Structures are given as C-alpha cells and as structure tokens.
Amino acid sequence: MPDNGFHDIPAGKFAVVVTHLEMRSPPPARAVNVPEGVIFRQVLPKLDWYRDIFRRVGAEWLWFGRLKLDDAALAAMLQDPARQFYTLTRDGTDEALLELYFKPDGDCELAYFGLTAKLIGSGAGRYLMNQAIRLAWEKPINRLHLNTCTHDSPQALEFYKRSGFTPYARQIEVDDDPRLTGLLPRDAAPRIPLLT
C-alpha cells in the first residue's frame, strides 16, 4: 500500500483515480424514449469504423487503450463473439459507442460507453444506458460492471450510480500520456495539463 500524501508522476505520464462499479441485479425499468432523429443499432464493426468512433467519443476523455492495439489484435477483439457493439446514429453519422463483453465467468462488462458532443445533453445517454442494462440482463449474467475515472466526464460517476451501479473498488492507474505517444492529438482534452 502506498504511503499517504503526494506522489510524483514522471513527466510524460498521467495518473487517474479509477472507480469500479457493479450491478448485481437489474434495476427497475425507467422508460426513456429514443431522442428524436436518433437510431439505436447493433454494429459488426470494422477496424476503421471502430477507431473512428472510439476517437470521436473518447478523445475528450483521453481514451487510449484500444488505440494501442495493432490491426490483428483489434480485429480479433472486434470479432470475439462474446462482445457486442452498438451505436446511436443521427443524420447518417454514428455518434455513440456501447460495448458489452460477456465474460466466461458469468460477468458482463460494460467495456465502453460514451457519446460524441453532438448527442450530449439530448437524453441519448440515458436512453443508451437503458439499452445497455436491458441487453446485458437479457443474458444469464451474475453481474454487470464498469469503471470510470477522474479523466471521464465529471457527471459520469453520478450518472452510473443513478443508473443502478454501486461503487465497490478504487485504484490509481498510471500510464503514458497518449497525447505524447501520438495515439491522440496533443490538443486533445485541453482541460488536462500536458506535462512533458
């Protein structure tokens, strides 16, 4: 266990506090209509589609994990029958990413969940979360779990709790800043200082 107090993070790295949340049974259904002009659909993703939506949804929050994968590793993940991918489409453009991973141990991970700026504030997030919960609990799972971190939207943690998730663990993650490794543009997430 680390000592109490402040700890230096080396230049070129960043640190986030990660909160893990879980749901052990489906919450009462909350009726939310799909926002006007939005279509919910399942996707059988190709590499280019996935990388594009991953960047457009996640760059603001410094999502980078999947950007580290080479073509073969990402293609294998996208073709894994235990994973399901969904999006919300508006005006012919996909504007959301929902990824469910049904694990062999009976858990379902809400691996990625997010909207582009075009849908934030439209009610699409609540609608998409309702779909995620419904789809997960249609299978014989033991629990649905996810994580969020201090680089995510400031509303994310409370949104997940209102959706029926309960925090159960916290960790600190340290990694290379993806803006310095070239995975994301240097001007991504300007609210998070870039320390070189």
Image (cartoon, rainbow, N blue to C red):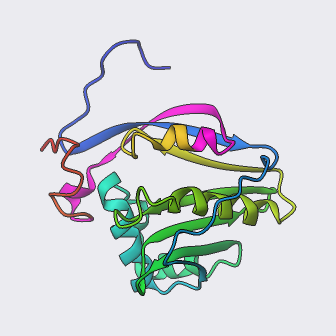
Instruction: Tell me which residue sits at (57%, 56%) in the image.
Output: 126
Residue range highlighted in magenta: 160-183
Residue furthest to the left in view is 196
Residue 140 in the magenta stretch? The answer is: no
Decide which of 136, 172 is in the foreground and name it. 136
Question: Could you say where residue 52 lies in the image, as x and y percent from the top left?
Answer: 36, 77
Quadrant (top left/top right/bottom left/bottom right) for the C terminus: top left
The answer to whether residue 68 is seen in the rendering is: no
Instruction: Tell me which residue sits at (73%, 44%) in the image.
Output: 23
Q: How many marks?
A: 0
Say which quarter of the image contains residue 119.
bottom left
Q: Is residue 87 left or right of residue 15?
A: right
Question: Could you say where residue 168 lies in the image, as x and y percent from the top left?
Answer: 65, 32
Instruction: Tell me which residue sits at (38%, 38%) in the image.
Output: 16
Question: Could you say where residue 79 lies in the image, as x and y percent from the top left?
Answer: 61, 82
Residue furthest to the right in view is 140
Residue 168 vertical position relative to residue 27 in the rendered view, above or below: above
Q: Is residue 89 left or right of residue 76?
A: left
Question: Could you say where residue 137 lies in the image, as x and y percent from the top left?
Answer: 80, 59
Residue furthest to the top in view is 4
The answer to whether residue 24 is seen in the rendering is: yes
Residue 170 vertical position relative to residue 13 in the rendered view, above or below: above
Instruction: Tell me which residue sits at (35%, 67%) in the image.
Output: 118
